[in-house]
Image (cartoon, grey):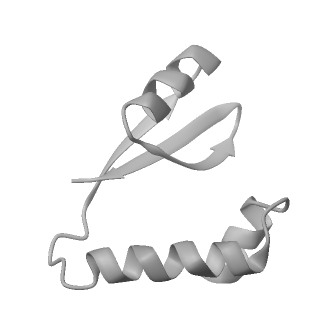
Amino acid sequence: METAELVVQNPNKSIQNTQVYIRIDRAIFQNTVNDKYHAKVAKTKKKSLQLLEAGFEYVLQKDDLDYFEKRK
């Protein structure tokens, strides 16, 4: 995900903080061959919370559904 996309998704975050997290992510996963993800869709807020607690990251919302991903 590009910096501009992250800033749009997190308008209350500073660009500096976003860039720090991008650098951390790249440092951790730069040598990772497996760039695959588990994807889940939540229809309710309860399910969204369960996915977040299970380590999934929020990706987007579309048609009243929340989409999440987690590296395999």
Q: Residue furthest left?
A: 33
Q: Is residue 51 above or below residue 13?
A: above
Lateral position of residue 65 relative to residue 34, left or right: right
Residue at the image position 68 percent from the left and 73 percent from the top: 17
- Residue 15: quadrant of the picture: bottom right
Lateral position of residue 25 relative to residue 8, left or right: left
The number of callouts visible is 0
Q: Nearer the viewer, residue 34 or 20?
A: 20
x and y, in percent, of residue 46 in the image = 57, 15
x and y, in percent, of residue 65 in the image = 62, 33
Lateral position of residue 62 relative to residue 20, left or right: right
x and y, in percent, of residue 61 in the image = 67, 43
Q: Quadrant of the N terminus?
A: bottom right
x and y, in percent, of residue 13 in the image = 78, 64
Residue at the image position 14 percent from the left and 78 percent from the top: 33
Question: Could you tell me if residue 1 is visible in this image?
Answer: no
Question: Could you tell me if residue 40 is visible in this image?
Answer: yes
Q: Is residue 22 above or below residue 59?
A: below
- Residue 21: quadrant of the picture: bottom right
Residue at the image position 28 percent from the left and 76 percent from the top: 29
Residue at the image position 84 percent from the left and 62 percent from the top: 11
